[in-house]
Amino acid sequence: MSALLCWLALVLVQGGPAAVIDAAVANGIDGGVYPAAVVVIGTGHRILHARGYGHFTWSDSSPVPDPDSSLFDLASLTKVVATTPAAMALVDDGQLDLDRPVQYYLPEFQGVNKERVTVRQLLEHRSGMRAFLPLNERAQDAAEARALVLNEPLQAAPGTRVEYSDLNAMLLGWIIEAVTGQPLDSFVARRVFVPAGMAQTRYRPPRALRPRIVPVGLWHGHAIAGEVHDQNAARFGGVSGHAGLYSTGMDLARYAQLLLNGGIADDSVRVLSGAVIRHFTRRGAGNRALGWEIRHLDDDASTGGQLSLDAFGHGGFTGTSIWIDPQRDLFVIVLTNRVFAPRTGRSITRLKEIRARIADAAVELRDEVCAGVAGPC
């Protein structure tokens, strides 16, 4: 038996799946992967585990993160917590056609073959756009950065390959703004966050909230909180389709439960239709759905081996992740600040291993808690 399996067996004997989760997260802190973490696990109707671990920084005198109140820089989770549900809502409302060319909504999106790029291909990451541009270095302001993205030539013919791209999400954000006539942050707050009960989720948190924001960087030895980590999002003033969003573990749990419950929030308010959720989370090319990743049988690096192949989710560079499994009626949220002065190399690889342990234990926890429950757990 491998050392990892021996460790898991020991923890299970000592305290069951909840103890496995606690030990896995503590292992990441002790190993220098991150100083702070929040884990929230639940079903469509109940929270099974919600706990904060460690401290905001490597100092034991800094705050302990709290699932209800501590705000994390979500990084690329912005794509699936803000931009994707905004697009889903517009499809529901009959205002967005996924198969229209991007140029229909953004006429300034010009270049060879760009007339063939559709909104759907942006969501699938099959547009042919490159993965990344250092806009913070090449542009002096948001207008110049936007122009660079809109004028960037395609790297491949539309629809021919999957290339995960921040630029796709930026374009989606601008399409949402063009359709609604509202800034992205205003629209998604009104149409998704408020009716879903996600009162803490926002772009550009005000200075008054900074004591509750888990820091992701250091400046001359001082922890920086509330300044978005993604420099391209910063160039756009902190609001972009690809990054910039902040949220808490419990707000993300509300969002996960919304999706597991067919688009209906806790107070019986319908935010999204079940049909649009199923459409956006259905497996497409490879391990992509529309905006979301889908669990791949050959890649359990961060999802473990127990989530079903219907599970969909996403990760963020700062150390955040969300996975939702409609077949198992389960969600697993892991928020960390692994970019805050990590004390180990390969921090992202180590974090993926920890996430996998948590996900496998989450399945065991759900089965344990819900075994004797009649009806939805």
Image (spheres, rainbow, N blue to C red):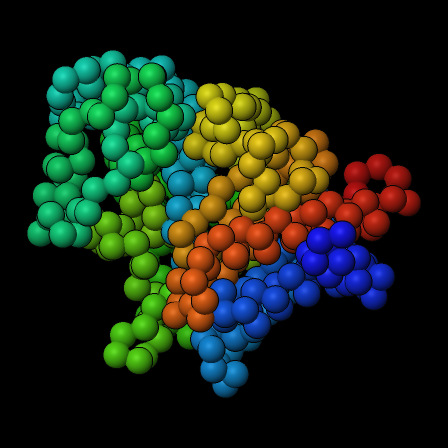
| Residue 136, horizontal then vertical, whole percent | 17, 52
- Left or right relative to 337: residue 220: left
| Farthest-out residue, right | 372
Q: Quadrant of residue 296?
A: top right
Residue 177 visible in the displayed image: no
The residue under the point 21% across, 42% down is: 133
- Left or right relative to 91: residue 139: left
Foreground pick, 204 / 140: 140
| Farthest-out residue, front | 1
Name above or below for residue 350 compared with residue 135: below
Name above or below for residue 167 compared with residue 157: below
The residue under the point 35% across, 75% down is: 223
Foreground pick, 133 / 48: 133
Looking at the rendered structure, the number of numbered marks drawn on it comes to 0
Foreground pick, 11 / 166: 11
| Residue 224, horizontal then vertical, whole percent | 33, 71
The residue under the point 65% across, 52% down is: 357
Which quarter of the rendering shows the C terminus? top right
Foreground pick, 88 / 116: 116
Residue 114 visible in the displayed image: yes
The residue under the point 19% across, 15% down is: 113
| Residue 361, horizontal then vertical, whole percent | 72, 51
| Farthest-out residue, bottom | 61
Q: Quadrant of residue 114?
A: top left
Name above or below for residue 298 compared with residue 45: above
